[in-house]
Image (spheres, grey):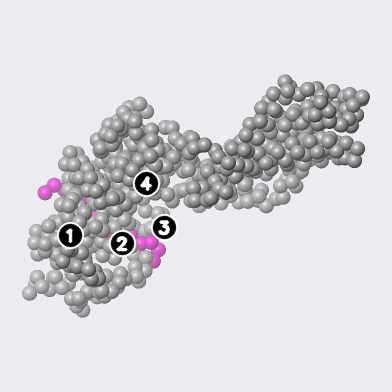
Amino acid sequence: MTAVAIVAPVRRRLTGRAAVGAGILAVLVVLAVLAPVIAPHDPNAIDPSRVLAGPDASHPFGSDALGRDVFSRVLFAYRVSLGVAVGSVLVAMAVGVPLGLLAGFYGGALDSLIMRPVDLLLALPALLLALSLITIIGPGSGVVLFAIAVIYLPILARVVRGSVLGVVGEAYVIGARARGVSPFGCMVRHVLPNSLGPAVVQASVLMGFAIQIEAALSFLGLGVQPPTPSLGLMLADGYQVLQQAPWADIFPGLAIAIAVLGFVLVGDGLRAHFDPHGVSR
Amino acid sequence: MTAPLLALDGVSVDYGLVSAVSDVSLEVSEGEIFGLVGESGCGKTTLALAVMGLLPRSAQVRGRIGFQGDDLLTLTEAGRRRLRGDRISMVFQDPEAALDPAFAVGEQVAETIRAHRPVSGREARKRATQLLTEVGIPAAAERYGDPPHRLSGGMQQRVVIATALANEPALLVADEPTTALDVTIQAQILALIRELRDRHRTTVILIAHDLGVVAQLCDRAGVLYAGQLVEVAPVERIFDAPEHPYTKALLAALPTRATGRGALPVAGGGVPDLADPPPGCRFAPRCPVRMDACERVPAFTSRAAGHATACWHVEAERAA
């Protein structure tokens, strides 16, 4: 059985802000993937002659305190940032969507069994949760990915449960039952595809925030470890020399802002897309 | 007379304190089209959902629903699911809502077949395409992959009927199948239902608030008022020789060309509160021929073959 699900609506062209967001993200992904080809310099190559040198033709974003090329480091840092952002949300969806679906569809005792621990997780401050996980497991980009996934899991489970509750009462779900489709079949083939929209919107916005969380944790020294380039680490390094070489901080900061903007614009566009009643602008 | 295909015996449905259907007994024989008439909220759909086994868990159902020798109310949920879409199927009021917007229409027919028959995907697809053709969808093979919103309301209802007929059910419950459609499309859908009954000998329970639809299509009809069945008769007799005061009031409210431009005739009073219904006949408070006996629930009496009415007044007339 193939659901025409998401295919049919998405065939409509993304317009306006969503198209801008998608364009930004596409460019960033290409830059990240092709970083080894595009980067003019080795991101970790130390050049004592260019310590805190300003932007010029061969180093468009200038150099940092160790003479490393900021542009090349931003490109490589995107690999970690985008990887963590997308990876953490995918992990959170892989666990959170089935949990929310089961809780919303079956209700009753199973709902409580699933949602009480989820609410517990939701009650903890996000950064505190991430910090404690990293304290337990140790720093690194894999741990950051996992920690962000744990923060996002209850959010996505709640969103999915909410839309499932709206969809289970729809006539077409009762109709599917009237045709003898098993409860599990109804849940997977009819309820799930029709409740994913809000979760997809949420996921895209959460990816943007994941970039910020990853940068924040790395800034604190709890995420990506040096010398691997990371936007958060670069902010931390550049922060020491902000007076003499603002470019060492401005460009990584801009890089974060642009990536977050891309994800949020796409989320905004998807929201308008999934909500036929809302006016998108 | 063969044994009835469907026999309701003292079926009541309560939603908490609200008595939606009260002590309904009726029999529907094989191959007939039985109309169930009544105004909104009188329990027509609740009765249909009780037969389907699709009432919400909060509903309490009592009585017996006999179908092909089984009492549906004693079956397990798995047993009832095996019947649904296979032996008993349903057509809904609003086809646009009844079809999954994210699912190709053909797939929804094929899904119904595969829920009950161990057939391959390709075979189910072939059969589903045949069914779409049979219910009058042009170029069915091309329409197969379309999402429901690409089809008009009439075509959507044809798809719903195709899903209902997918496994050649013995009983088809059609809950206001034409209410959401244009008048011209209504006639086509009604003709389709009759044609399918003639071809497959499917028994049909047609729920309608539109008496015209019942007159066109049904062999017999039952009139529901506030959850009580008040009259059952061959459809000509419902229109030509109605006995129950409610049936008479319902027919009197039908606008005709002679009605002119004035206010439409309406029965006086309002439908009783089903959380606290009148103790006996629920029509008694509005009834022009009310008697003291109406404090008690009237039994069905019959003055002509196949015509039964639950009314103390009718019974008193008959005795006199």
Q: Is residue A57 left or right of residue A171?
A: right
Crowding at label 3, few (<14), some or many (≥20) Cα neighbours within 10 Å?
few
Secondary structure of residue under mark 4: helix
**CB of mark 1 within 8 Å of CB of mark 2?**
no
For mark 4, what is the residue? B96
Q: Is residue B23 left or right of residue A134?
A: left
Which chain does tag 2 point to? B
Crowding at label 2, few (<14), some or many (≥20) Cα neighbours within 10 Å?
few
Magenta-tinted stretch: B1-17
Amino acid carrying label 4: it is Glu
Counting from the top left corner in percent of width and height, residue B301 is at 14, 65
- Measured Cα–Cα span from mark 1 to mark 2: 19 Å
Residue B232 badge: 1
The quadrant holding residue A30 is: top right
Amino acid carrying label 3: it is Ser
- Measured Cα–Cα span from mark 3 to mark 4: 27 Å
Q: Is residue B256 visible?
A: yes
